Image (cartoon, rainbow, N blue to C red):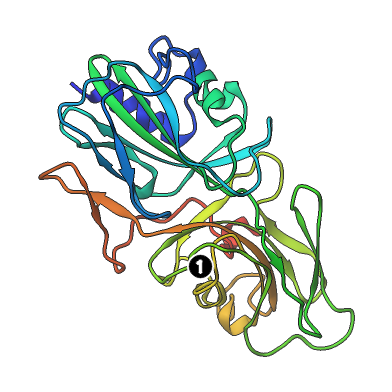
């Protein structure tokens, strides 16, 4: 019964569905658009940032009037047309509260702020919103009441500038946030891991076992040449679970307790990078500049209820396609 709806949401959360082009899109019937309040039947939304929202409403939910409203406004940068937008999404079946789909199972979804990427109704809902906003949307699809919560996440670091210690690489940022790393011309690289916040964000601290979504650039200390980056046009951020060996040890250690929204410089010695491997980077000291965009614990669907249940820190939710520090991407 829910197969088609689940497929639509799976595609939506995966970033590949153009809502405006679908004959029966998930958000295609939002009536008057974002100015239209959802159904007169109340839906209460609670829950902390970085966790799946808790939805409270009378079941079965009756969508009297589809629409959207702001649960809370954001205080960060405004979303910009034709620029990237990063979203956490969580959807329930209003009949019984079962989870239809959720980015908290894996990682946030990356779009372009355009009707072609988001679909016209979700695009209109997000226009004028700022990073940190949470939106509630309700719609009925094939008789199924869909209740969707969307969180707007940062696409680049922001925060208070932190002075850089002497002897470390320096970083310049382009207008769009792209970092350029300059390694000191003289002097041997440090023997130990160096962790230097460059911008201190205001989000929660990264914890071992969380899925961290990040944009990064990486260069060799020896010649300053870049060997990896997610800042090229069309490249999505990368996500990895911290502390379980999906990243090089220097990143696993250095990103823990950094705050979401921060930009962090890490100088990784060979022993915490690719030392002892057959990689061309085995003998290199590596320099990473990482923008931390999101961090959350993965959740899994409880088969008995369909509700989301917390996933233990020791569980491995599957390895993302590419990781910072993965020599399969070596340039």
Using the image as rendered, state which of residue 57 and residue 21 is in the foreground: 57
Q: In the image, what residue occupies the spot 76% across and 78% down?
A: 164
Q: Secondary structure at mark 1?
A: loop
The percent position of residue 16, horizontal first and vertical second, equals 49, 29
The percent position of residue 25, horizontal first and vertical second, equals 40, 17
In the rendered image, which residue does mark 1 sit on? 247
Horizontally, residue 132 falls left or right of residue 13, namely right
The percent position of residue 52, horizontal first and vertical second, equals 34, 49
* Picture quadrant of residue 165: bottom right
Mark 1: few/some/many CA within 10 Å (<14, 14-19, 20+): some
| Residue found at the very far right of the displayed protein | 185
Residue 146 vs 107, above or below: the answer is above
Residue 323 vs 209, above or below: the answer is above
The percent position of residue 295, horizontal first and vertical second, equals 46, 59
Using the image as rendered, state which of residue 146 and residue 323 is in the foreground: 146
Q: In the image, what residue occupies the spot 29% across and 34% down?
A: 43
| Residue found at the very far left of the displayed protein | 304
Q: In the image, what residue occupies the spot 36% across and 23% down?
A: 38
* Picture quadrant of residue 144: top left
Horizontally, residue 36 falls left or right of residue 287, namely left
């Amino acid at each position: 019964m829910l197969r088609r709806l689940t497929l639509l949401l799976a595609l939506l959360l995966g970033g590949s569905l153009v809502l405006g082009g679908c004959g029966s899109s998930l958000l295609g019937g939002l009536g008057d658009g974002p100015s239209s309040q959802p159904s007169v039947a109340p839906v209460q939304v609670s829950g902390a940032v970085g966790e799946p929202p808790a939805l409270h409403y009378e079941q079965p939910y009756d969508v009297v009037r589809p629409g959207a409203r702001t649960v809370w406004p954001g205080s960060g940068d405004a979303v910009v047309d034709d620029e990237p937008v990063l979203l956490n999404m969580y959807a329930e079946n209003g009949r019984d509260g079962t989870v239809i789909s959720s980015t908290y199972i894996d990682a946030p979804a990356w779009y372009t702020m355009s009707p072609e990427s988001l679909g016209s109704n979700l695009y209109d809902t997000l226009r004028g919103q700022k990073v940190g906003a949470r939106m509630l949307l309700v719609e009925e699809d094939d008789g199924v009441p869909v209740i969707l919560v969307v969180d707007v996440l940062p696409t680049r670091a922001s925060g208070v500038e932190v002075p850089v210690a002497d002897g470390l690489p320096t970083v310049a940022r382009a207008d769009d946030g792209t970092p350029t790393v300059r390694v000191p011309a003289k002097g041997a690289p440090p023997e130990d891991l160096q962790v230097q916040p460059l911008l201190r964000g205001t989000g929660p601290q990264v914890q071992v076992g969380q899925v961290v979504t990040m944009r990064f650039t990486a260069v060799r200390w020896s010649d300053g040449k870049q060997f990896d980056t997610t800042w090229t046009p069309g490249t999505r951020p990368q996500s990895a679970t911290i502390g379980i060996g999906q990243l090089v040890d220097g990143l696993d250690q250095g990103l823990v307790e950094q705050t979401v929204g921060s930009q962090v410089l890490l100088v990784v010695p060979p022993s915490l990078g690719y030392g002892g491997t057959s990689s061309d980077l085995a003998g290199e000291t590596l320099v990473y500049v990482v923008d931390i965009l999101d961090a959350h614990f993965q959740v899994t669907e409880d088969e008995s209820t369909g509700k989301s249940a917390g996933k233990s820190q020791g569980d491995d939710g599957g390895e993302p396609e590419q990781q910072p520090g993965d020599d399969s991407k070596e340039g």
